[in-house]
Image (cartoon, helix red, strand yellow):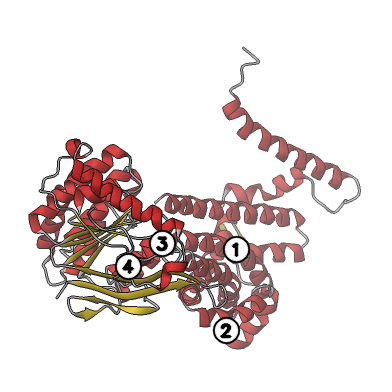
Amino acid sequence: MFMKIDTNYFRPVFLPLLGIAAVLFIWTITSATWAKKLPSPLQTWEQSKDYVMNPFAKRGELDQGVLRFTGYSLLLVIKGYVLAILIGVPLGLLLGTSKICTESLDPIIQVLRPVSPLAWLPLGYILFEQPQPAAVFTIAICSMWPTVLNTAVGVRAIPPDYLNVAKVLNLSGWKLFTKVYLPATLPYMFTGFRLSLGIAWLVIVAAEMLTGSPGIGGFLWQEYNSLVYEHIILCIVTIGLVGFVLDRMMSFVEARLRVA
Amino acid sequence: MSYLVLDRVCKSYGTAGKRTEVLTNVSLSVERGEFVAIVGPSGSGKTTLVAMIAGLMKPDSGTIVIDGKKVKGTGLDRGVVFQNYSLLPWFSVFSNVLLAVEQACPDWPAPRRKQHVERYLRMVNLWPARDKRPAELSGGMRQRVAVARALAMEPNMLLMDEPFGALDALTRGTLQDELIRIWDDNRRTVLMITNDVDEAILLADRIVPLSFGPQATLGPEIIVDMDRPRPRQSLHRNADVKRLRNSVTEYLVHSRRKPASRSLGSSTTPLGIGAAP
């Protein structure tokens, strides 16, 4: 009986737990030996318990539950992300349909794409003179490129058969767009949306650190300054988990679109 | 005047230096209400020919005239059935046909359009599958949707590019019967491309062979002077059918032995093998 472990559940549950245990072990050893300033897993949990168990508590401006901080960050991310999609999709469609646009815009996109959020943020400050709009601007400009490029690829990948059908049916304008271009491109767009959301979530932490906005990144920076190192780890774990959940959600939608 | 007139149509692919002429001096006239089958081997440029008549492609030289007007692009006067069905996978069977009806009859109110779609889906026996997506259908069912979509536009001419090529023999037979029944009801002009000589004999009023490519051209026409309906079962025993099949096949084989060099001859000149011995 003992040997009869259902391997269907065994592997996907046990192996990840094994990985987590290994990391916790290395972490414990590290904090006990050469990195005395690094809080141990147990210390981290003791210090973070309050923030995790009462995730929506608000004890003061700088002392709030971890999900409340996450909420602030997500709100900012959504603003920047929506802006990125609103600009990225039309730009991608333009690049996908017009060779002239591709040839004239592609070099500048390839140059702007690798620029770090830390480099855009000061420019956002200069343009908008407020931390929040500066952060939204930075998120939008950093996260829109995957949406732009994937949308363009999607448009170029539309099977010529569908375009021939559209032509023999004399589809044009809005109808051509909604009945053929959009549904054919949507799976590609969603890959772009998923990658963009990942980047937006990366950028928010940097943006909050630099602007001091309330949020999970701002909290991290503030706790570093107040020497509560346990909370830095709490923030890192939270940021990672939220990013993971966002990615899963988008993958789910993406997979459903591919089937259709 | 004939409904469809092709006059010395030529089409090449590729860039300068590496150009291949696919079709050379293709001339053809199709009368209103006539069912014409173009029979040719694969790779002879049949799809290119359909694409040009449909208006998806322009000939390099020569003209295509439909109903007295030169073809400049696609039009709703021609219903096209593509070789690979080309249904839009994100729409249901019903919506695929409805989209065509919306385009062909923009002035109709919505209920009338829906009735019209229903009529044509029932005609091809697909009304029970109306809410299915193309991916859920078999090849034969998809092809019936494609036929229904083309017919529902009530075009003056139906252009079919190897419509039953990808189907098994049984399904193919059923669809051929359906097609000829529908055609018999309203006698639209049909131009069908096929690589199946027997299919052409079964369906068409007239067969025009297309020679082996490159530089394919149309051979002498062969009139199928047989009454309808033509019972499939007895066809292979019929002496006329044998004779017809032989003339088409002989022309095609002949055209392969003497490639390229005969390209200068116009297709209006018979190329050796007559329609009837």
**Measured from the top left, where is residue A169 in percent x and y?**
27, 68
Looking at marks 2 and 3 on the same chain, the residue that comes earlier in the sequence is marked by: 2
Badge 2: chain ID: A
Neighbours of disc 2 within 10 Å: few (<14), some (14-19), many (20+): few
Q: Is mark 1 on a helix, strand or loop?
A: helix
Looking at the picture, tell me which residue is in the foreground, A204 or B52. B52
**How far apart are the alpha carbons under marks 4 and 1?**
39 Å
Mark 2–mark 1 CB contact (< 8 Å): no
Residue A56 seen from this side = no
Q: Is residue A232 left or right of residue B108?
A: right
Mark 1 is on which residue type?
Trp
Looking at the picture, tell me which residue is in the foreground, B95 or B40. B40
Q: Is mark 2 on a helix, strand or loop?
A: helix
Q: In this view, does A32 lie above or below B275?
A: above
- Residue A184, which numbered label? 3
Looking at marks 4 and 1 on the same chain, the residue that comes earlier in the sequence is marked by: 4
Query: Which quadrant is home to the N terminus of chain B?
Result: bottom left
Q: Name the residue under label 2.
A: A104
| Circles 2 and 3 on the same chain | yes
Q: Which label lies toward us, 1 or 3?
A: 3
Mark 4–mark 2 CB contact (< 8 Å): no
Neighbours of disc 4 within 10 Å: few (<14), some (14-19), many (20+): many
Residue extending farthest right: A34
